Amino acid sequence: MTETASAPATAAFPDTRPPGCPFDPAAEYRELRESAPVSRVSCPVGVDAWLVTRYEDVRSVLADPRLNSRAASPSNHVNTEADLDAPANPGSILHHDGPEHSRLRRLLTPEFTVKRIQAMRPYIAELVDQHLDAMLEGTEADLYHDFGLPIPSLVICELLGVPYADREMFQAASGVLLKVDITQEQRLAASGQIQGYMAQLVMAKLANPTDEDLLGRLIQRANASGTPLTVEELVTLGISLLIAGHETTANMIALSAAALLQHPDRLAELRADPSIAPAAVEEMLRYLSVVQFGVFRRVVEDLPVGNVVFKEGEFVIAALSSGNRQESVFDRPDEIDFSRNASAHLTFGYGAHQCLGQQLARVELQEVFARLYTRIPTLRLGIPFEKIEFKHDALVYGVRSLPVTWDTQA
Amino acid sequence: MRVNIDEEACVGAGQCVLAAAEVFDQRDEDGVVVLLQAEPPAELGEAVREAAVLCPAMAIHVED
């Protein structure tokens, strides 16, 4: 075994964006794609890993059943205190593979079909308009806290059957859980809080599961399948959906606004023809790659990648943001171009774990892109661009806040 | 053009429906892909190929 062990890493995992380019991934990726598309890096968590940077390799490793997700939480390689040997919690869809993952995913997929999500579009559009109406009563707002965060939070609460009035607790807890460098105590405190909350909610739904919300329908569907979900499984599933459902989209809304306000030509295209919103959303998903540290996996069976062999027990990082900037796949990848077809981007991942809620995220972002910039045509930053604080230390990239202003509407 | 789908592999991501709604749908009960036309006309060829490329589970196979 030792004679075939992989060489130790000589470089650190690239986690620093180039100065002055807050929308570009770490500069190392460009060179790695050319010269060392499969390389060894040392990770903050304390292990060495294979770093895969080319688009084709990212897709092929993420679709390969010889890699598993148990230690994947979602970017454990950058968390210095992560326990890579922790068992996967029952019901944790992110950490199970194979038949157990399929069982959990199949119970949830009916809630996220294209048809189901399209049916939510009028409600989402109305929600966006209500928030814009409220903003337009003044002439300034924080586009993250007043707009980006409430819209997906309201949508996921409505879908799940979680009272929106309880949002402060779960928004704060998920903010902690998605930070890179939290201590075990912080993690336990935040997850304990959100688990206690979700457990109460789940118990109430179990006592009276109705068709009116996802948790109720999930309970009924699992019962009908002959394998009812346990309280623990339901709590874990509920928390995963609640966190994934609001943080990612909230960050995309505010971060893409920060980027588009720096690209007035692209913004003018969108204002002139809001029907291009779907293409614009795909392009911004590609360009911004908000799951900024990629996807972490562990090898369960040797597999060849390029001219090396990943050995059982080794770790792999699939660099989504790097693949999304590969020139042979996306022409002039560092430019925002709404006329390209960006829909094969890697931002929602690839393989069996590809984002379950991607169609919901799309519709939310499309309604925001089609409405925000036309309803507030004079929208601009309320602070100098250099003063914007970006979330370099969060698993989902974004801005901490985005003060904006506009002229009084005639 | 002939399309084959692997229902077992399908993870219900819905990418095929977005790419080619004339050819693919999803079952209401479990979100699994439903093939509406196994031999779609040539003008849908590009959309069907895109659906196959986008499918994260590689559950769509196209024969010419």
Image (spheres, coloured by chain):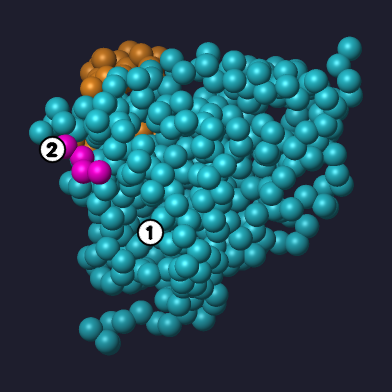
Chain colours: A cyan, B orange
- Location of residue A393 with respect to B39 vertically, above or below: below
Q: Nearer the viewer, residue A401 or A6?
A: A401
Seen at 61% across and 60% down, the residue is A393
A230 magenta-colored: yes
- Which of labels 2 and 1 is toward the front? 2
Q: Is residue A279 visible?
A: no
- Asked whether A406 falls inside the magenta stretch, the response is no
Q: Position of residue A409 (x, y in %)?
A: 86, 16
Q: Residue furthest left?
A: A226
On residue A227, the disc is: 2
User: Label 2 is placed on what type of residue?
Assistant: Thr
Residue range highlighted in magenta: A227-231
Examine the residues drawn in magenta and state their main secondary structure: loop
Q: State which quarter of the image contains the N terminus of chain B.
A: top left
Q: Is residue A88 above or below residue A325?
A: below
What is the spatial separation of the Cα atoms under label 2 and label 1, in whole angstroms?
A: 26 Å
Label 1 sits on what residue type?
Ala
> Which of the numbered marks, if any, corresponds to residue A38?
none
Q: Nearer the viewer, residue A358 or A60?
A: A358
Q: Residue shown at 72%/36% (left/top)?
A: A143
Residue A293: give x, y in percent of width and height: 53, 58
User: Which quadrant, please, contains the C terminus of chain B?
Assistant: top left
Q: Residues within 10 Å of mark 1 (few under 14, many from 20)?
A: many
State which quadrant residue A333 falls in.
Answer: top right
Residue A281: give x, y in percent of width and height: 59, 31
Residue B30, by quadrant, is top left
Task: Name the residue tied to disc 1.
Answer: A72
Q: Chain of mark 1?
A: A
Task: Please rate how many residues cluster around mark 2, counting C-alpha atoms within 10 Å: few if below 14, some from 14 to 19, many from 20.
Answer: few
